[in-house]
Image (cartoon, helix red, strand yellow):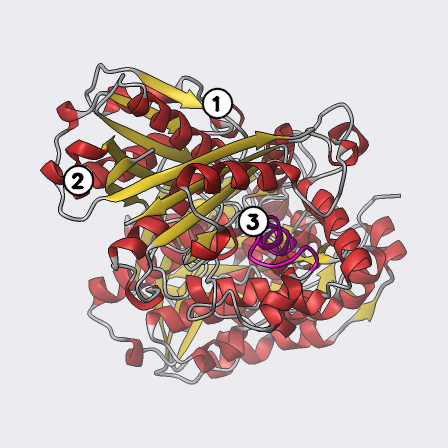
Amino acid sequence: MKVAIIGIGTTEFGENWDKNLRQLAIEAGTKAIIDAGIRGRDLDAVYLGNMSAGRFVGQEHVAALVSGELGLSIPAIRVEGACASGGLALRQGLFSILSDQHDIILVGGAEKMTDLMTDGVTSSLMGAADQEWEAYYGVTFPSLYAMIARRHMFEFGTTREQMAKVAVKNHHNGSLNPIAQFKKEITVDDVLKSTMVSDPLTLFDCSPITDGAAALILCKAELAKKYVDDPIYIVGSGQASDTLALHDRRSLTTLDATVKAAQGAYKQAGITVKDVDLAEVHDCFTIAEIVATEDLGFCKKGEGGKLLDEKETEIGGRIPVNTSGGLKAVGHPVGATGIKQAVEIVLQLRGKADKRQIKDAKIGLTQNVGGSGATAVVHIFSR
Amino acid sequence: MIGIVGYGGYVPTFRIKVEEIAAVWSSNVNSIKNGLNIEEKSVPSIDEDTATISTEAALNALKMAGIDPKDIGAIYIGSESHPYAVKPTSTIVGEAIGCGTEFTAADTEFACKAGTAGIQMVMGLIQGGYIKFGLAIGSDTAQSKPGDALEYTAAAGGAAFIIGKNGIVAEIEGTYSCSSDTPDFWRRDTIEYPSHGGRFTGIPAYFKHTVSATQGLMNKLGFKTSDFDYIVFHMPNGKFPIKAAKMLGFDPKKLEPGFVVSKIGNTYSGSSLLGLAATLDVTKPGQRILITSYGSGAGSDSFSIKITELIEEKRKKVKKIQDYIDNKEYVTYAQYTRLRRGI
């Protein structure tokens, strides 16, 4: 399998109070179109990842909103899979090209979250969890991931300091990324001393509420060089599901959906984990990055904390993770995150990641998770 | 030359400490103190409200002005805690201080800047030749939802300013405003406590308007930051005014004489005006003060004020703001709840 990415675009991520969902999506989409050197009328379809515009801003039907705003009458499809909406939109877009339905498409992700107050955002996000068996009992995402963290600490001796190191690393990377919501470096001590959110997770263990959009232009591999000199190829895609409710799962410390999605993507790409040069993973909470690095096979189960102690996931390390700054520092506009991850990998493989550049990066991976792990989607990218 | 003929303030005696409130909500005292840069706030007694606070402040202003209250032709009282939804506070105060009946009056509301809006309205009437003296007051007994971040700052107090052309202690050299539809903080009618947009109250709200109005005033009058000896900004907490000063290129030390927030909290419509009164209490003739209010919703009024020779004699006649700040009695959270009619 091989599909080319010939254009990328993102808005700044953050509290974009002066921009609405429409403006954010159009900004990212237009940037991607310009980056690819194509025109809007060259597009055959639009796929848009969006989790909850209906609850966040009262707007449904958002894919047609965006294509209409771009002046296009082509098919426009919204894809929803909670915080994995972006990754799923990318996968659906891939399929449309691989099935010869389309030659060139726009795949975007967008979310406008700051129109609601924090409690409204929190309850909207809980739509990604099991309403009847989790939300009704007062559980929120910080508390679900806190349970994962506690269990990880219990089973493997993972420490608060190790979790804090995820935030420190990603804030450092974010400080090098012009689109990041947080560009300030922080220390382990800052994380440990920040306000308690859900024991053991403090404020700085959590990704923020963010407005933002990201977009990619995908085209058939054989057409790519017609438009750009440096296309990046998607060579593997995997997706899997699990129960919505955390308590129904086989394990609290492994996201089986990630493991399966990764296996599928590695197999399709014809690579092993050792071939991966860098990864963008779904660090909605610091513990989530630790679990992800294990589930993707970057280390043995239970050794995700050690990976941080040994600086292996830092820029310049053995397997750099979240060079963009991740969800933690770039921000987490839920539907846009999966596409933003792909944008970072494309930048890295193009050699255009500036101060975050990983030397000679050839193969990159993205892992995008919905809810507490009920959906996982993994993509592998190659130069 | 138009200016301030007399001014006065009032702050209730009761105080509650940040520690006392934080203990009730099991909150981290240090992070609150660091986050808000505030130690304690004033609490109105059970029989104090915007009308009584305004009256106390107006009596001080009148005493300093040394004028016949019947010469006051307009009274505007800005507050977001007028005792009545319908029935003016301004007539209660006018009657209480002996203004007779020949005056126009209205209550104003513009979140925390309704008092400075009143000063501008009075200035217009005086410049138009309609009245001789006018009284503008900013005063509040601010509401806050128990447990909300606002509970640490929402306080009570007010300041009154008599504006006129004769016997001025400080000249108002000019004023400039900036207003926009910015929903950062609001309270609907019949709703007990205000709501706010968290961080949205910062950059797009407080800072945008405070900075724009201040820069607008300086451009209009041709002043630089170095032309002002002291500055006063609205004080929703102890952090925002300092940051605004830095953004504008002022030495934050110029805020110090009027920096009442750390000891009495945010007195809403009274906040920047109490800061101005406290600054006037210590300034010397010839010095210049910049004051920029801020009201959510949102807008800022900026004024350039130059002190005259008369201030030294006239201000001796009344209690200083610092006297009110120093006169205090601490209450527990239970007493506070009773005073706020929670139990």
Measure the alpha-carbon separation of dots 3 and 2: 31 Å
In the visual, does A7 lie left or right of A142? Answer: left
Q: Residue at the location (45% across, 69% down)?
A: B243
Q: Is residue B242 above or below residue A72?
A: below
Which residue corresponds to mark 2? Answer: A36
Q: Is residue A15 above or below residue A351?
A: above
Nearer to us: label 1 or label 3:
3
Nearer to us: label 3 or label 2:
3
Q: Residues within 10 Å of mark 2 (few under 14, many from 20)?
A: many
x%, y% of residue B62? 55, 63
Label 3 secondary element: loop
Q: Earlier in the sequence, mark 1 or mark 3?
A: 1
Q: Residue at the location (75% across, 64% down)?
A: B28
Label 1 secondary element: loop
The reply to whether residue B37 is visible in this rendering is no
Q: Amino acid at mark 1?
A: Gly
Chain identity of mark 3: A
What stretch of residues is rendered in magenta?
A: A285-302
- Residues tagged by mark 1 and mark 2 found on one chain of the structure: yes
Label number found at residue A296: 3
Q: Amino acid at mark 2?
A: Ala
Q: Residues within 10 Å of mark 1 (few under 14, many from 20)?
A: few
Residue A269 drawn in magenta: no
Which residue corresponds to mark 1? Answer: A58
Who is closer to the viewer here, B219 or B66? B219
Q: Earlier in the sequence, mark 3 or mark 2?
A: 2
